[in-house]
Image (cartoon, coloured by chain):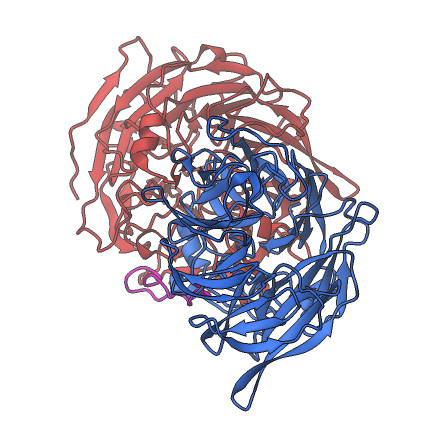
Chain colours: A blue, B red
Amino acid sequence: MTLKYTALLSLFASFAQAQFGRGGGDWMAVGGDAQRSASVRTDPHISVEAVQGGAMQLLWKIKLNGVPTPPVVASRLITYKGFKDLLYVGTSADNVLSIDHVVGRVFWETHLPYDSLLVPVKTGTATCPAGMTAAVSLAAPLAPPQPPAPRGGRGPGGPPGNAGPGRGGNMNMANVPTLPRPRRTPGTVYALSSDGLIHVLNQHTGQDIVPAARFIRGNAKAHDVIQVGNIVYAVTSDNCGGAPNGVWAIDLADNMVNEWKTGEASVLGLAFLTDGTVIATTTKGIAALEAKTLKVKQQRDGEYATTPTVIKVKDKEYVVASNVHGHVFLLDPVSLELVVNVAGNGATIGSSFASWEEAESKARWILAVKNNAVVSFKIVEKDGTLALEQAWASKEMVAPAPPIVVNGVVFALSSGSRTAPAVLYALDGMTGKELWSSGKAITGYSTSGVSSGASKVFVGTHDGTLYAFGYLLPRE
Amino acid sequence: MRTSRFVIAMALGCAWSPAVSFGADWPTDGGNPQRTAWQKDEKILNKDNVKNLKIVWKIQLDNKPIEMHSLFPPLIVDKVNTPGGPKQIAIVAGVSDNIYAIDVATAKIIWQKHFEYPAPARRGRPTDPLCPAGLTATPVIGPPNANGSRTVYAMAGDGEVHSLSVADGEDVAPPFQFGYPYGKSYALNLWDGVLFTTTAQGCAGNPNQIWSVKINDPSHKVMTYNPKSGGLWGRTGAAIDESGVAWAPTGDGRYDPATQTYGNGLVGAKVVGNELKLQDYFEPKNWAWLQSRDLDFQVTPAIFKYKGKELMIEASKECRIYLLDTKAAGGDDHQTPLDRTPLICNEEVNFASAGIWGALASWEDAQGTRWILSPFWGPSHPDFKVPISYGPVTHGAVVAFKVEEKNGKYKLIPAWMSRDMDQAEPPVIANGVVYAFGSGENTEQAYPDRGLDDNSPERIHDSTHAVFYALDAETGKELYSSGDQIKSFVHFGGLSVANGRVYLGTYDSILYCFGLEGK
C-alpha cells in the first residue's frame, strides 16, 4: 500500500539542533556526493545532543569475502522482497554486496566475473593492489537535494456537504521525525570490476541491467568512481596494471569513453561543480575539465596531495584542496586561482576534506587530517575577503582516515595498525569535543575509511569485516 | 436504480432438499459487530460430518469485477417473510454497485438492485487494485423491527446509503450521503442505531478515518474521527466493543500523541452526542519499524469476553498478534499489551505477500477455553513453535492460540497451525469447525525489474483459484478440502456460515454454497 505515504511526507520537524528533511541521508559515492563534501547535512537521529545522549552503538558487523571499499547507502527502497534500506559495498575480490543496513543482513551478493580475455589477472602489490579498488557508486546529483517543501492536502475532507479534515488535515508540525518518500523503481549501482568493465547493477537484485562495458584497462588502481549525469567517471593512479594515469568518463548512453591522461602524474581525485565541470587534482596540478569530454578548461600546476572538495560560501562555489607541503587552498572554480592560502608548516594534510555548514549561522567549516589529528577550519569573511581560521584539533590518532560529518557531528577514524585496532570517534563539530568512541568494538585495522548514511556510520577493516555504528531503530 | 438484471443461476441439479431452517443469521461481515467470525448458532455442520461437504449450489451473478474486486461476503437472514413466503436469504453485494438477494433453498435470485449515479469527479487510477470505482463496503443488516422486517444498509459507490427491505429490496427510507464517492469504504458495522465504516488508501481524495452516522437522525450528520494516519483498512471495517467504541487499525504513519497522530496503531472512537470522539488507542512500541517497512496495522480486531473481561486481539503485516483490554488498550502508556505473540511469519519483512491481513476470529469451546484464530500469508517464521502442525507452510496458513490467564497475567498460547494454504484468508468458526480458504490470489505488488508496480491485470493473470477448507477447531486437522472445484480466486471476499451452509464468492462473480447432501 503506497498512497498512504502521500499523507506522511513533508514535515520539517525541529528536533533539538537536528534538521530533518533530506532524502534519507543517502551516501552516493566516495566522499558522499558529487562535491565530495563527506557530509550528511541532516539526520533525524544523529546530532551532538543525540550522540551525547547515547545514540551511537555498534549495530552489527558482517564478515565479507574481501576487503570492503567504503559503502554507499540508499534507503526506503520498495523491492520485490519488501521495503528495504540498503547499502552497497564492493570488495577486493570483485564482489558486490547489498546489505539491509537496518538489520545487518545480506540482501544480495554478486560476483563480477573477471574477463581474462581482456587482460590477465595480476597479483597485487602494496602500490598496485589489483582486485576491485574503487568503491561502487550510485547516481549522484550535481546539486545536493533540498529538503522537500510541505505538501498540501489532496482533496476535500469528508463527504459532500460535510466538513472534516482532508488529507491536508493530516499535515502538522510535530516532534517525531518523518520518513523520506519510498522509492518505487529500482535504481542502479555502478561497479568497476578489476578487469576494467563498468557494471550497471539493479539495486534490488544485483544483476547487470545491461552488458558490462569496457571502461579502463584491467588491474588499474582505480578510485573515485561516481555516476553524474548518466556518465560514470573514474580516476587511475600509479600506472598500475599498465593503465595510464588519468581521468576517465564513459557515457552510459553509448558506452563512449573519454579520458584525460596525466602522464606520470597520478590522479588524486575529482569533484564536480554544479555546472558539471569536473575538478581533478593530480600530483602535479589541478584542472577543470568539461563534463563528458574531459577537455581541459583550465589547469594550474602544483604538487597537490588531496582530492578536491567543492564548497559553497554565500552561494559562490570554491574548490578546497591541499598540496604536499600542507597548504590548504581555497581556489576560484573557474580560474583555479588562489583565493585563500593557509600555510601548512610542512604538515601534510590527509587525502581528502570534509565540509559542513552550520544550520543556523550558515558558517562553513572545513575538516581534514593533519599531524595525525583531525583539524577544523572555519571560513570567515574579513574586510570583504575570505579567510580560513583554524578552530580546533582533535587528539592524535593512529593513521586517522579523512573525517566525515553527520548533522554537525564529526566522525573521525583512528585507522589503527597491525598492533592497534581502529577506533571510531564522534566529535562535536563546533568544538572538537569527544562525544563518543567505539572503544574496543572494532578488532582490526582499517584501510577503507568511513562513510555514512541513514543515521549510521560504516567502517571496513583489513580482515574483510564491515562495521555499522549508529542509531538503533527498535524492531521488537 | 433499477431492479432487474439478467442473471444466470446454475443450480447443480442434484437432488438437494431445501435447506432446513434453524434460525441462525450472519447479518454483518465477520458475523457480528465484534467481528469474532464465530457462528454460535450452527447446529447442522459439525466436525464429524463436514468431510461430506459438497457444493450445494453455485450461482453466476452478473456483477462485473472491478480491479480484482467482485463479490463481498454474503449476509444471511433466516425466516424472512417474503411475498413468496418465509425464506432464508443470502444478501450479496457486488463491486459494480449490485445487491443480490438469493433464496438459499433454491439458489434463485429473489430480487436485485443496481445503484446508478452520476460519475463522481474523481476515481482511482485504472488498473490500481487499491481504489476500485464502485461499491466496496460489505452491507449490514439491521435487527428486526416491530413487524419482524429486516433492513439491509448498503453503501453505493457514490457514498449514499440505501436502506432496503431484505424481503423485497424496496427502499424503506430515502438514501442518504454517508461516505465519499469512490472513496473505498470498508465493511459497514451497525451498533445501537449507528452505522460505522472506515476508509483507506485516500481513494478519490477521501480522507482515512472512521465514519459514523445515526440511522434515525433526520439530518444524517456524518461524524468522523481522523487519526492522521495511513489508511484504516481492516477488511471488515471497525469492530465494536460493549461500550459502543468502534475500534479500527490505522495504517502506516507516525505516532505522535502531542499532535494526536496515531499511525500504525489501533484507535477506538465512540459517538458522544453528535460527535465521534477518540476514546482510547494502542500503539506498538516498534511502530517506527513497522512504518519504515510498510507493515501496517491493518487487521480488523476481534473483541470477546474472557473471564468477565472484554478483550481484543489485533495484528499487522509484521505477523504477530496483540492481546488488549478494551477498557485500557495498551495500559497507561498505550503501548503495553496484555500479551504479544512472537513473530508467526514474515521473516522476510515483506509488505506485500506476507504477514497477517484482513481480520481475525475468536470462539469459546464447551470447556470455556477461549481460542483465537489468525490467517497469515507466506512462510511461517522458522522460530515460531506450535504444538500441532501439518507440514511446511510456505504460502500461508491459519494459526490458533488459546487465551490463558494466571494471577492476572494474560498469555496467548500457540495451539495449532493448519496445513499450507495459498494466501490464507480470515477464517470463520461454527460448531467446532474452522472454515478457511486460500484465496489463490496473486498478492505481489513489486517486481525485481520494476520495483513497485501494483496492477490489477498482472495480478489477475497470475492468480489461480481459491481452495475452501474445513478444519477441526481444536487441532487444525483438515476435515475437508474443495480441491480444484472453485475455479477462480478471491480478493476482498470472505466466508459466511449459517444453518448448515458456508458461502464464498469469487472473482468471476460466482457465489458458491457448500453444505451437506439432504441437509
Q: Main secondary structure of the magenta part?
A: loop
In the rendered structure, the answer to whether residue A420 lies left or right of residue B92 reads right
Q: Is residue B137 left or right of residue A178?
A: left
Viewer can see residue A4: yes
Q: Is residue B460 above or below residue A403?
A: above
Identify the magenta region: A143-163
Magenta highlight on residue A296: no
Left or right of B386: which side holds A201?
Answer: left
The x, y position of residue A295, in whole percent, is 37, 57
- Which residue occupies the foreground of this view, B312 or A124? A124
Residue A164 % position (x, y)? 38, 65
Query: Which quadrant holds residue A268?
Result: bottom right
Q: Which residue sits at x=46%, y=33%?
A: A207
Q: Is residue A145 magenta?
A: yes
Residue B2: % across, % down: 15, 41
User: Vertically, is B52 above or below A282?
Assistant: above
Residue B493 sits above or below residue B479 on the image = below
Report the residue that reaches farthest toward the top.
B15
Residue at far bottom of view: A383
**Image location of residue B185, percent across then percent down:** 36, 48
